[in-house]
Image: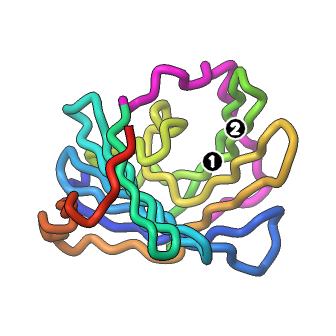
């Protein structure tokens, strides 16, 4: 069980080579921070597994917004099925052997997830869909019922200590949204 780590993911669409953004995940104890970076937006989600709310910040150009939300949201779709993805060869990501599973949700979204059981973190739900996963997710595809699939692929993992200041937000810099 790992209590501190950071992961960086490369984000692509429809299995293309061109990167559309990156996602950082920081885990420290029962706290988690995710930072999604694209050309148009920087969005941060901060939550503590012992709390029922989370903070979301959105930086769009010169505009900065902050919202407190119920986490997990009450309108979370229900998991319909979870099945193992059969692979002819072992998948290795960042040197770790990974298993694959496919999750189907009631809203038609499918998650294809690759995770290692060699590492488990104190917070594994940096995506709500990972609640049932028994290891550290190192790659996943989100496939909507209609639209463009998005792939997240881990490019870096770091087990160095993370400063507590990483989880602080200066609320004075943000416009509060209700």
User: Which is more toward the observer, 102 or 177?
Assistant: 177
Q: How many marks?
A: 2
SS at mark 2?
A: strand
Q: CB under 8 Å between callouts 1 and 2?
A: yes
Q: Which residue does the image show at 51% across and 75% down from the upper left?
A: 61
Q: Which mark is residue 39?
A: none
SS at mark 1?
A: strand
Q: Which residue is mark 1?
A: 113
| Residue 14 drawn at (x, y percent) | 83, 62
Residue 8 among magenta residues = no
| Residue 100 drawn at (x, y percent) | 65, 47
User: Which is more toward the observer, 155 or 85?
Assistant: 155
| Residue 72 drawn at (x, y percent) | 41, 30
- Say which quadrant the C terminus sits in: top left
User: Which is more toward the observer, 47 or 67?
Assistant: 67
Quarter-of-image position of residue 134:
top left
Q: Which residue does the image show at 63% across and 53% down from the upper left?
A: 140
Task: Please say if 87 is above or below 60.
Answer: above
Which residue is most to the right? 146
Q: Give the magenta part as a residue range.
A: 70-93
Quarter-of-image position of residue 18:
bottom right
Q: Which residue is mark 2?
A: 102
> Reading the chain from its start, which is encountered first: label 1 or label 2?
2
């Amino acid at each position: 069980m790992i209590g501190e780590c950071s992961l960086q993911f490369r984000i692509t669409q429809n299995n293309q080579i061109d990167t559309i953004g990156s996602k950082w995940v920081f885990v420290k104890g029962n706290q988690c921070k995710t930072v999604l970076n694209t050309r148009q937006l920087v969005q941060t989600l901060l939550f503590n597994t012992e709390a029922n709310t989370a903070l979301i910040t959105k930086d769009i150009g010169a505009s900065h917004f902050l919202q407190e939300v119920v986490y997990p949201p009450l309108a979370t779709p229900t998991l319909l099925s979870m099945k193992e993805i059969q692979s002819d060869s072992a998948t290795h990501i960042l040197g770790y052997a990974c298993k694959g599973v496919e999750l189907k949700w009631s809203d038609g979204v499918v998650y294809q997830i690759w995770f290692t059981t060699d590492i488990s973190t104190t917070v594994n739900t940096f995506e709500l869909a990972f609640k049932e996963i028994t290891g550290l997710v190192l790659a996943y595809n989100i496939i909507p019922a209609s639209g463009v699939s998005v792939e997240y692929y881990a490019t870096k993992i770091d087990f160095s200590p993370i400063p507590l200041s990483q989880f602080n937000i200066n609320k004075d810099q943000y416009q509060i949204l209700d």
